[in-house]
Amino acid sequence: MTNEEYYNKYLDYLQFERKLSKNTLLSYEENLNRFEEFIKGKSIKNIERNDIEAYLKYNEEMAEKTRAHYLTVLRNFYQFLVEEELLDQNPCETILMPKISKTLPHYLTEEEIEKLLSFPLNTPLDYRNKAMLEVLYATGMRVSELIHLKMNQIHLDEDLIRVFGKGSKERLCPISSICEKYLKMYIEEYRFILLKQKSSDSLFLNTFGNPITRQGFFKILKQIAKEQGIEKDISPHTLRHSYATHLLSHGADLRIIQELLGHSDISTTEIYTHLVNEKLKSDYENHPRAKKNGD
């Protein structure tokens, strides 16, 4: 069997027997494609423990949680092949999971967000990038939700975007007038240029007229942050964290934020109260009478 046949057999199992959601399947497929790129066509059946360890080391710049997910996907994939008697053993079996440190998520201040979003607009790609970043910060949606947006999910007349989150759960995300302005500008004036006479219902397109990818968006964000002098190491999720933190600091109800983010459990949303509390503590320590020094 070719590597592609191994992957397809596993993905079919996840889709038809495990009945995983579309977004989860896409995540698994992207992970397997990333692994395939790393092993450069080496046969799946010849992969050994040291190959898996090298792959994890190659991705060591990623967060521990991300690398743990990569390992989980490969471990489950190989376990499936063993159970199907396509392989004799799982090369991931004895590899320990990366230790996931419990740290508060990173976010940008409101001033840093303004700085990030104020990059110059000259080309159709600039206007697409502006619309993408404005949507991400205006809604707090996940990057997977952003790149899979379809034209029929955008309701500019109501200032709403219909989002399909984890488990295909639908939610409505309101957008600001600024976001609506740049999104409308992109759709009406620049999207057709990127479309290049192709037919597509995807909202955000790359230079070839195809849907933009997660990796593509990540590169765009990193480049804009660098050009705008943002020194923090940011990711698409940083904008999601910033959105929630800023909402909470301006008095939004935690349950409303939970709904807007698409969290199934309020405990996931509660992490943002810790962020706000940390900021309040930091601001107070800058008060001239905060440090008493024994007085």
Image (cartoon, rainbow, N blue to C red):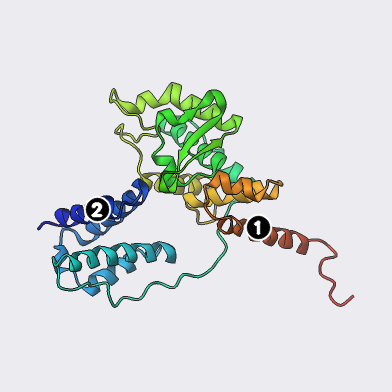
176 left or right of 89 in image: right
Q: Residue furthest right?
A: 295
Q: Which quadrant, please, contains the N terminus?
A: bottom left
The mark tally for this picture is 2
- The residue at 37%/23% (across/down) is 192
Mark 2 Cα within 10 Å, few/some/many (few <14, many 20+)?
A: many
- The residue at 50%/29% (across/down) is 183
Residue 186 at x, y percent in the picture = 46, 27
- Mark 2: which amino acid? Leu
The reply to whether residue 161 is visible in this rendering is: yes
- Mark 1: which amino acid? Thr
- The residue at 24%/60% (across/down) is 38
Q: Closest to the observer: 110 or 121?
A: 110
Mark 2 vs mark 1, CA separation in Å: 38 Å
Which of disc 1 and disc 2 is earlier in sequence?
A: 2
Q: Is residue 239 above or below residue 86?
A: above
Q: Is residue 85 above or below residue 218?
A: below
44 left or right of 286 in image: left
Mark 1 Cα within 10 Å, few/some/many (few <14, many 20+)?
A: some
Task: List the residue tagged with mark 2.
Answer: 11
Residue 226 at x, y percent in the picture = 49, 49
Q: Which quadrant, please, contains the C terminus?
A: bottom right
Q: Residue furthest left?
A: 1
Q: Closest to the observer: 130 or 6?
A: 6
Q: Is residue 126 above or below residue 14?
A: above
256 left or right of 101 in image: right
The reply to whether residue 223 is visible in this rendering is: no
Task: List the residue tagged with mark 1.
Answer: 273
